[in-house]
Image (spheres, helix red, strand yellow):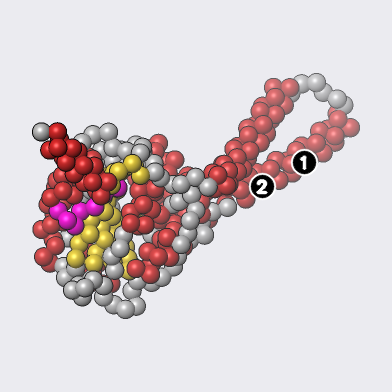
Amino acid sequence: MNAKNVMKLSIIVPCYNEQEALPYYFKAMEALRPQLPLEFEYIFVNDGSRDQTLVLLRTLATEHASVHYLSFSRNFGKEAALYAGLQRATGDYVTVMDADLQDPPSMLLEMYAKIQDPEIDCVGTRRIDRVGEPKLRSFFARLFYRLMNKFGQMPMMDGERDFRLMTRPVVDAILSMKEYNRFSKGLFSWVGFNTVYLPYENQKRVAGTTSWSFWRLFSYSLEGIVNFSDAPLNMASFVGASSCLLAVIALIIIIIRTLVFGDATAGWPSLVSIFLFIGGLQLLSLGIIGKYIGKIFLETKKRPPYLIKENEQTYLEKHATTAGSQTETH
């Protein structure tokens, strides 16, 4: 709590090519500010944007003392941006939001009212529909949640979003996990604490275009399954054991047929097909095992999840130094 006994809300906003949406987002949040008895602390994380996102963040940080930003040296991904924002946050409450207004700022009013219950540590959100989303993407999204709930270590709500309001103990618990391969939805569930979810209807982007293609979302889902479930490894073992059993049964059948009917040379196309099928299963199993080994490999490297090229402090210091040098020259 600060000197004025006003609690602080840290607002973490990952940004990747959000120059069109940022002005709308900031305006909506500032309009909400008088309705919350909290001091605002914006933490924008520029994840290697290629448009004018960083320029806008510099302007906002110069004009508003409550605005802070981190700018990565390149695109490290949303998970790294979330982690960086959580590390920088100093608020009594912390929320994670997207800049495209698909996470409605107005929901923070109800979320804040809910979290005043001492028994509630986190208030999350979940979409109750997928209106406007491509059907193929919706199908695989629902399939992902079913798989995670069936085989994963932690249950997840269908339509669960990263948008949530957390107390400081929840944030500290998440930060205590130093793993390189991060999947925030899984981490939010893994730390436990009492979480309630608020439903809302799907919202369209206020401006700009999404950077999440179908294949990028598909890859992200695979990362989540691998990070929080050993079901793929069990599946590989099951496939291998089943293949061996089928091979033994087929061998017994071949021996019996040979003894009864003699050795027939026909059937080599089916034999080749079986070889190809078994070879495919082996490659699939090796691929699954390789995915887990790759995760271990990245963890053992101990590389930082992100690298910061600039923040509002270094920018303002550099700007002041440059301005001073020009004044001396004149």
Q: Nearer the viewer, mark 2 or mark 1?
A: 2
Q: Is residue 324 magenta?
A: no
Q: Position of residue 82 (x, y in %)?
A: 35, 52
Q: Amino acid at mark 1?
A: Ile
Residue positioned 30% across, 43% down in the render: 310
Query: Is residue 102 visible from the viewing direction of this image?
Result: no
Between residue 242 and residue 3, name the one nearer to us: 3
Q: Amino acid at mark 2?
A: Ser
Callout 1: helix, strand or loop?
A: helix
Residue positioned 20% across, 62% down in the render: 40
Q: Label 2 belongs to which residue?
A: 237
Residue positioned 42% across, 41% down in the render: 218
Callout 2: helix, strand or loop?
A: helix
Between residue 277 and residue 46, name the one nearer to us: 46
Quadrant assignment for the C terminus: top left
The answer to whether mark 2 and mark 1 are in CB contact below 8 A is no
Q: Position of residue 130 (x, y in %)?
A: 28, 49
Q: Is residue 65 magenta?
A: yes
Q: Sort mark 2 into few (<14), some (14-19) or many (20+) by Cα contacts within 10 Å.
A: some
From which residue to which does the magenta span run?
64-70
Lateral position of residue 234 relative to residue 40, left or right: right
